[in-house]
Image (cartoon, coloured by chain):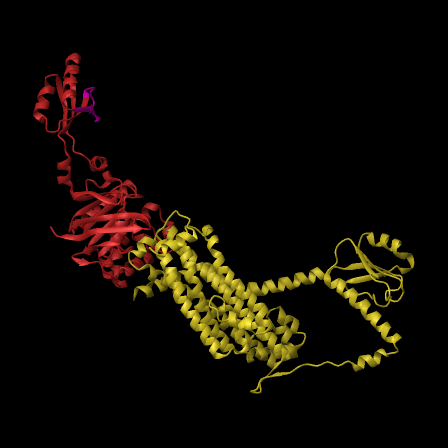
């Protein structure tokens, strides 16, 4: 697949502080890309470089194969983490102004704004001032402003912070639809679980360095460790205790946490390559009724923590 | 429409639509006139206090000196002596007591004022003048000089001022020039401070509203800063133009009114208190208006525009940088000194050096140094400034505003993305290198 955006060994220092250290990412066209990492990792700096707000010290960024130039800002829609609007300006004027700054003509801007306002059912806000709207309502306007010029690349920094669950879902659906229509999306967040299910590709950044990137499923496959959560309705306590001892001797066994209605024993068994699920199942079913047997797929969060601790 | 034009337009509309702009444009001239009237009324009120003063004159020479006026009543208790007089003067409704020794011509410290409060300078001066006059007269008479002869011998001279091209001007004209120059300089300082603050506040607003990053992902920080400065400049020019037009109309109206029928002047004059005072003497009003018309008004207005734009650019880019560096208005205080200092210096130099000697070294130098030149030069313009000085001053001004705009934009660029930090001067210098 073609990469729409490629950052090649990008570094940025602020005084003595290194914000990015030789970070390279490639964002495939039409994908949803997660730029993940804790606060202060350097995500926002990278995004600002992509938006040409700051310039990299070394390294280069290309968009659609061309090195970044001033006109590329029209191809990017950016919703920063620190976002807001002019409080005392009317919604309509504001949307038109910001769209014109992105290079739309006034007539075009008006047409598209009307379209979005109808779609999100906010048409009657046109003449209101931002300060008269609620925070969630203002966020909708913010979204419209971000996408209105039909950018090829959409960048959302901490996309769902500040949205209530209903609006967050609404916006999520809109973003997915834009992706289906051909846009490429970058989500940057420290709340990895919030975008995990949406992303096709991810890059993990920690302390100015990229520590991992690739397709989500293949990363997960690489990190899955033959781990299963099991639930057993125990028949004979003493016998089961003995079996548990044996399991603990062979594998890493920890208490598992999942919802169930019965009072079964819950265990998480990490087998690695020492055994197979079937063997485990056979062992368990001799000691009771197996009510739960499910593979644990590592979350990006787990992978992140694991990678960070490995790299130490 | 280009991006810069868009930004300028937005900033201009945001300024002009603001309520405080409308108030300042249309109400502040009225408020100014109101203030002047109020102050003159209060001053009048202050001196209208009636007071009674006891006089104990041991010499008996000065009885005629202390005649009653509207405000002061003198009670001569010379025959009762100092101590009795003091007792009376201590009573309710008395301001104090003047005691004159037996032989004031010989004795030192012959005149004493007793009172509860320290009397005003003007009051003491008045008393001294009266007694001195009387004593001088007595001395003259003692020398055998007739006072009437002396009075007729007195003469007065009024120097006429004329330049080599034959234009005459009067002392009045000098005062008018100083007045207009001073007013223009002061106005310019106010403009720079008010509009500079507007720029700063609007930068801070964009930071606190968190819209800044949205905007600079579309435009360059430099474009945004320049758009802001230019848009606000236009708002300032709009305001000043309104004042010039209104002032011009007022001037024309006044001139016609006075030209046709001077006796109706005081009734028809809506203008400020100075006009009111002068109105008692219509001839003087006409002279004043003639002098105003003789001023290089066009040069003054054009000069105001040029120096306003130049000085305003110079300062507002610093204002913008300060706004970008901080998170809220209270944090701006520490950075205000470098702005306020040269402006104040300009005003003081203007009011002392220029009015005393408009073409002296101090006035000339300060009217060429960029940070003070807008104010000082503007004050000098009514006195006709050599062209080379104007040219040098404007050139330097332009050069230095190019520099401060560059410098300001460097800080602005970094500052707008810094949140939650209260920067120091050291930080600002560090930002220049980012």
Residue A210 coordinates in the image, percent (x, y): 21, 44
Above or below — where is B178 with respect to A19? below
Quadrant in which residue B72 is drawn: bottom right
Query: Foreground: B211 or B122?
Result: B122
Answer yes or no: is residue A111 visible: yes
Above or below — where is B408 with respect to B177? above
Answer yes or no: is residue A174 visible: no
Q: Residue most toward the right?
A: B79
The verdict on residue A258 being magenta is yes
Query: Foreground: A172 or B348?
Result: B348
Residue B12 coordinates in the image, percent (x, y): 39, 63
Q: Residue at x 20, y 25 (%)?
A: A256
Residue B65 coordinates in the image, percent (x, y): 83, 67
The verdict on residue B98 being magenta is no
Q: Quadrant of the C terminus of chain A?
A: top left
Principal SS element in the magenta part? loop
Query: Foreground: B364 or A172?
Result: B364
Please give the count of numbered marks on the rendered protein.
Answer: 0
Q: Is residue A138 left or right of residue B150?
A: left
Above or below — where is B259 with respect to B320? below
Residue B125 coordinates in the image, percent (x, y): 75, 65
Q: Is residue A269 left or right of residue B202?
A: left
Q: Residue most toward the front?
A: A16
Q: Which chain is red?
A: A
Quadrant in which residue A163 is drawn: top left
Q: Is residue B70 left or right of residue B87?
A: left
Q: Where does the magenta region start and end? A: A252-265
Write down the colour of chain B: yellow
Above or below — where is B409 with respect to B263? above
């Amino acid at each position: 697949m073609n990469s729409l955006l490629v950052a090649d060994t990008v570094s940025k220092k602020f005084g003595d502080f290194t914000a990015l250290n030789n970070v390279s990412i490639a964002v495939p066209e039409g994908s949803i890309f997660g730029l993940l990492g804790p606060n202060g990792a350097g995500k926002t700096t990278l995004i600002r470089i992509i938006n040409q707000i700051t310039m990299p010290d070394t390294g280069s960024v290309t968009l659609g194969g061309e090195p970044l130039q001033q006109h590329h800002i029209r191809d990017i829609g950016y919703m920063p983490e620190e976002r807001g609007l002019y409080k005392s300006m009317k919604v309509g004027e504001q949307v038109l102004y910001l769209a014109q700054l992105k290079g739309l003509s006034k007539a075009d801007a008006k047409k598209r704004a009307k379209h979005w306002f109808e779609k999100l059912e906010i048409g009657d806000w046109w003449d209101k001032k931002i300060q008269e709207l609620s925070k969630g309502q203002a966020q909708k306007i913010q979204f419209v402003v971000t996408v209105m010029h039909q950018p090829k690349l959409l960048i959302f920094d901490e996309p769902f912070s500040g949205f209530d669950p209903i609006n967050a879902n609404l916006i999520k659906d809109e973003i997915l639809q834009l992706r289906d229509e051909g846009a490429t999306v970058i989500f940057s967040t420290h709340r990895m679980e919030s975008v995990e299910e949406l992303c096709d590709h991810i890059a993990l950044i920690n302390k100015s360095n990229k520590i991992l990137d690739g397709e989500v499923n293949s990363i997960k496959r690489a990190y899955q460790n033959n781990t299963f959560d099991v639930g057993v309705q125990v028949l004979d306590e003493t016998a089961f205790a003995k079996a548990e001892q044996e399991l603990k001797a062979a594998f890493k066994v920890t208490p598992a946490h999942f919802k169930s209605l019965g009072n079964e024993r819950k265990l998480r068994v990490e087998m690695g390559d020492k055994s197979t699920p079937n063997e485990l199942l056979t062992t368990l079913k001799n000691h009771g009724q197996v009510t739960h047997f499910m593979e644990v797929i590592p979350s990006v969060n787990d992978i992140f923590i694991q990678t960070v601790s490995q790299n130490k | 429409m280009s991006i810069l034009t868009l930004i300028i337009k937005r900033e201009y509309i945001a300024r002009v639509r603001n309520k405080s702009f409308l108030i300042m444009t249309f109400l502040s001239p009225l408020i100014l006139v109101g203030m002047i009237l109020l102050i003159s009324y209060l001053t009048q009120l202050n001196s209208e206090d009636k007071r009674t003063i006891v006089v104990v004159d041991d010499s008996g020479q000065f009885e005629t000196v202390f005649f009653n006026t509207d405000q002061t009543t003198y009670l001569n208790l010379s025959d009762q002596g100092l101590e009795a007089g003091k007792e009376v003067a201590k009573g309710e409704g008395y301001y104090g007591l003047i005691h004159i020794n037996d032989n004031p011509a010989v004795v030192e410290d012959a005149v004493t004022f007793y009172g509860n409060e320290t009397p005003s300078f003007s009051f003491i001066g008045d008393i001294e003048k009266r007694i001195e006059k009387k004593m001088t007269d007595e001395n003259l008479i003692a020398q055998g000089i007739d006072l009437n002869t002396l009075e007729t011998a007195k003469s007065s001279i009024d120097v006429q001022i004329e330049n080599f091209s034959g234009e005459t001007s009067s002392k009045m004209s000098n005062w008018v020039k100083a007045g207009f120059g001073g007013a223009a300089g002061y106005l310019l300082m106010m403009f720079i401070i008010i509009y500079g603050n507007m720029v700063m506040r609007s930068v801070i607003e964009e930071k606190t509203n968190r819209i800044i990053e949205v905007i600079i992902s579309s435009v360059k920080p430099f474009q945004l800063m320049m758009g802001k400065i230019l848009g606000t400049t236009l708002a300032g020019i709009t305001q000043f133009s309104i004042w010039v037009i209104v002032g011009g109309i007022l001037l024309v109206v006044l001139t016609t009114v006075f030209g046709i029928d001077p006796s109706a002047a005081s009734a028809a004059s809506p203008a400020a208190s100075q006009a009111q005072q002068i109105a008692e003497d219509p001839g003087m009003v006409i002279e004043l208006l003639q002098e105003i018309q003789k001023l290089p008004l066009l040069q003054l207005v054009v000069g105001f525009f040029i120096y306003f734009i130049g000085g305003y650019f110079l300062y507002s880019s610093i204002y913008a940088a300060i706004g970008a560096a901080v998170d809220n208005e209270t944090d701006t205080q520490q950075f205000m000194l470098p702005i306020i200092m040269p402006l104040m210096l300009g005003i003081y130099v203007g009011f002392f050096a220029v009015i005393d000697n408009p073409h002296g070294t101090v006035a000339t130098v300060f009217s060429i140094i960029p940070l003070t030149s807008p104010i000082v030069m503007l004050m000098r313009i009514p006195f006709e400034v050599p062209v080379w000085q104007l040219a040098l001053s404007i050139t330097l001004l332009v050069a230095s505003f190019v520099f401060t705009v560059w410098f300001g934009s460097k800080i602005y660029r970094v500052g707008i993305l810094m949140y939650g930090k209260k920067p120091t001067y050291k930080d600002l210098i560090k930002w220049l290198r980012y």
